[in-house]
Amino acid sequence: MKIGMNMLVWTAHVTQEHYIIVDTLKETGYDGIELFLGAGDSKLYSSHGKHFSEMDMGVTCVTCLTPETNIASPKKEFREAGLDQLKWAIDMCNELGAEVLCGPYHSTNSLFTGKPPTSDEHKWSIEMLQKAAAYALPSGLILTPEALNRFECYLYNTMEDLTSLVKQVDSPNLGAMYDTHHANIEEKSQSSAIQHIAPHLKHVHISENDRGTPGSGQVNWDEVFSSLKEINYDGWLTIEAFSRLDPDFANAINVWRDFSPADEIYTEGLQFIKQGMGI
């Protein structure tokens, strides 16, 4: 089992200026970091990959799609653009030496039709994810689509939804991710949700109900940690928390205040996970 920290607390676009933060995370005891992939080129991510490898810091990545790159769109050109975007993200993961590409890229978050999901939308999403998984397969990269709460997404909200998606994509390198924040909204219990997704679980986001320091809010962490131990989960446990340190990103995801100080999130968050998992 490895513990990671998502860099979105500080920035949506990591540059060399942020290496000092990564150094601090390494010294604090983290096994790796998670980067958001939204911009940049192979030169940047190759340089990052070499630096993080020399530090012995593991890497996972997260990405998302825009309305014009929605792979569940009725417009074929949007779906194809979305597949191209996913291929780019996969390429950047390979430059980084990343193990996992997670995120709600089964569709576009915060985009709604005013209707429940249709069978066509599910079909289009599955078809494009099959192609993305095939593209990623030779590198060994694991794709882990993410279910979001109903206020951010309508296509896949629960672990039952996500199980259906993973089974229909049916690719050896596509699994599921579990986010405690979204599950806190959508699931009847954290334990039953984790048990349900267990056969397909490849990545976990440790995220408080308000996106602040893990352990400071309303998530039922006893259920989360006990269930992860029961299923013998041994993948990444990555803290995902948000702040106002990157105003453009914060505005885009409706974060209007700081929920916890950044240094509290990564220091207390790490100890909270270790205590909860008994490591």
Image (cartoon, rainbow, N blue to C red):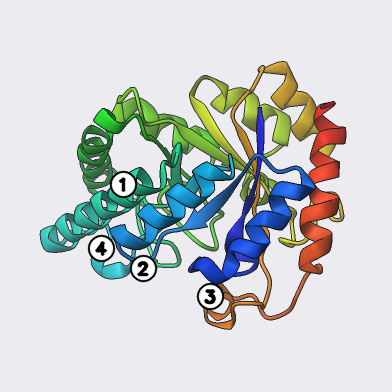
What SS does tag 4 mark?
Answer: helix
- Dot 1 alpha-carbon crowd within 10 angstroms: few under 14, some 14 to 19, many 20 or more: many
What is the distance, in whole Å, between disc 2 and disc 3 at their CAs? Answer: 13 Å
Task: Tell me: 117 left or right of 228.
Answer: left
Q: Which corner quadrant of the image does residue 196 belong to?
A: top right
The single residue placed furthest to the front in the displayed view is 54
The residue tagged 2 is 39
Binning the other alpha carbons within 10 Å of mark 2 as few (below 14), some (14 to 19) or many (20 upward) gives few
**Relative side of 272 to 116, left or right:** right
- In this figure, which residue is indicated by the disc labeled 3? 249
61 shown above or below 85: above
**Residue positioned 39% across, 67% down in the render:** 111
Q: Rate crowding at label 3 as few (under 14), some (14 to 19) or many (20 or more) other CA atoms within 10 Å.
A: some
Mark 1 residue type: Ile
Q: Which mark is residue 219?
A: none
Residue in the foreground of this view, choosing between 10 and 201: 10
Q: CA distance from mark 2 to mark 4?
A: 14 Å
Label 1 vs 4, first from the N-terminus? 4
